[in-house]
Amino acid sequence: MAIRSRFDTHEVFNQSPPYENVDLFTSDLPLQDAIKANGAAQDVAALADFGRYWGTADMFALARSANENPPKLHTFDAQGFRRDTVEFHPAYHRFMSESVAAGLHASTWTNSGGRAAPPAEVARSARFYMAAQVETGHLCPITMTRAALAALTAEPPLAAKVVPKAVTRSYDAAFRPFWEKSGMTLGMGMTEKQGGTDVRANTSTATPADDAYSITGHKWFFSAPMSDAFLVLAQAPGGLTCFLMPRFRTDGSVNALRLQRLKDKLGNRSNASSEVEFTDAFAWRVGEEGGGLRTILQMVQLTRLDCAVASAGLMRMALVQAVHHCRHRSVFQKRLADQPMMRAVLADMALDTEAAMALVFRLSRALDRAADDPREAAYARLMTPAAKYWVCKLAPAFLFEAMECLGGNGYVEESILPRLYREAPVNAIWEGSGNVMCLDVLRALKREAEGALFAAVSREAGLEPEKFDAADEAAARPVVGRLALLASAAALKSSAPPAVTDAFVRTRLARQHSALYGAGDIDGATAELLLRRVLPEP
């Protein structure tokens, strides 16, 4: 129903009502289909509860508050003692509490640190996907906590201390040692000023001290600085090594993590990212000296998946906002949603959204089964960087197109679109830029199993096996983009109606797709199907 309000000079009408108090799960047919296709059908009722709760007006309002009130750094307390704490708005803490209670930080792990049985990854990804549609910033410490547990498996005695605190469903924001708390979160600091992604260039040094190490150096990006402990990389006598650095020393004193400033970021405003210096900071070794990269790679696969899942979630919310607006807005005596050109744009966007979502859930299924299925493990190795590359590259331009669908209303801060738009680029940058992802795919393609998998994905997409050159770095981006499209088509075949898959293959694989939405030449019946799947008509 149209919202009307009378001013002294005019009556307000022909405006779309707020998109709130919605069920993020049962209103999303592609998500429901993907959940069932990837083995998590038994979780549907719980996911619907999650979707209804996170789609309330209260949660959307909290998201606005969390981002309009960014965190503040307090380096000293009133007595002049160095504390290096970060103050967050209560709305941020509410999101952290809700996500931890739902297990987004640790539901894929058992209490002893083992991987939870399938479909733990698929079920968690569904919740992460819905949460990202509402508030993405707080998901940084959530995803790092979950991923850091993978790295800690390299040091079982240390994992035995940390895992029981990390897997609880209790969010404890108190600033005290993690062993005194009901639950904990984990952050990380890998990159330094001089090296960035090239962590072998790190200069921070770690000196053995009894059964631990003393670390001196810096991190240029130190994520979620109010976490209870951090995975960091430093140069030990045996080479680049991974360490766990707690906020407090074992005697209860504050550890020497000197937060220099909080990053003033384009987006991700509710979450804190910082610069830090370590002045003989206390830390425990994780894994062997010199094995830091090998240890860290245990977690990177999980954080990269979450980057892709979150980007797919941002795309979903942007598309829903656009479709919702166009169904309530009339132009030239016709609903925008019924105007042929706008309908073509929305249907073309819906095709990419559904493909991105299908791909990340197929990848989640592979991670669920990787431990017991070599082919699924090979799929996860190859497709994690490929999915992150394609989905995260796709999202920013997609968000802009959705914003344009709302016109001026989509460009102002009262709309959710500006926040989503600013949020989108970080997932393509964090955990490895596009070029880094492509290099990782090339390395995977050089392995025999993954080379065969490229051909298998082509066949699953209904196409002849394609050749590739894993040695040509200059041509890596087209190769990786093509691989992601093939894998998306194959994923759609298992979860979407044939007309959707056929439209994707015809417009994205059989020919070069235009960079401009609305040029996909999707037939009327398929367009109608796609838009019905986006959001049920009111």
Image (spheres, rainbow, N blue to C red):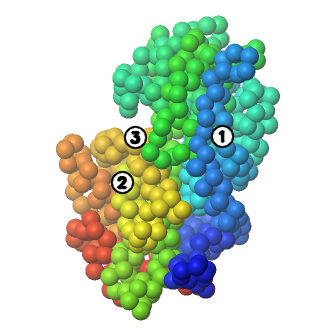
* Residue 355 versus residue 180 in the image, above or below: below
Q: Position of residue 200 (x, y in %)?
A: 38, 23
User: Can residue 355 be seen?
Assistant: no
Where is residue 92 drawn, in percent x and y? 66, 47
Cβ atoms at labels 2 and 3 below 8 Å apart: no
In the image, what residue type sits under mark 3?
Gly
Point 36% across, 23% down: residue: 194
Q: Residues within 10 Å of mark 2 (few under 14, many from 20)?
A: many
* Residue 337 pos. (x, y %): 43, 83
Q: Which mark is residue 393?
A: 2
> What residue did someone put label 1 on?
88
- Quarter of the image where the C terminus is located: bottom right
Q: Is residue 212 above or below residue 219?
A: above
* Residue 432, label in figure: 3
Q: Residue at x 53, y 45 (%)?
A: 269
Residue 509 in which image quadrant: bottom left
* Horizontal side, residue 439 vs residue 381: left or right: left
Distance CA(mark 1)–CA(mark 2): 30 Å
In front of the other: 285 or 444: 285
Name the front one of labels 1 and 2: 1
Q: Residues within 10 Å of mark 3 (few under 14, many from 20)?
A: some
The circle drawn on residue 405 is: none
Q: Residue farthest to the bottom?
A: 333
Q: Residue at x 66, y 17 (%)?
A: 82
Residue 134 horizontal/vertical position (percent): 59, 59
Kind of element beneath mark 3? loop
Callout 2: SS: helix
Q: Quadrant of the N terminus?
A: bottom right
Q: Which three-letter amino acid code belongs to the residue tagged 1?
A: Phe
The residue depicted at 45 percent of the width and 86 percent of the height is 330
Q: Is residue 296 left or right of residue 193?
A: right
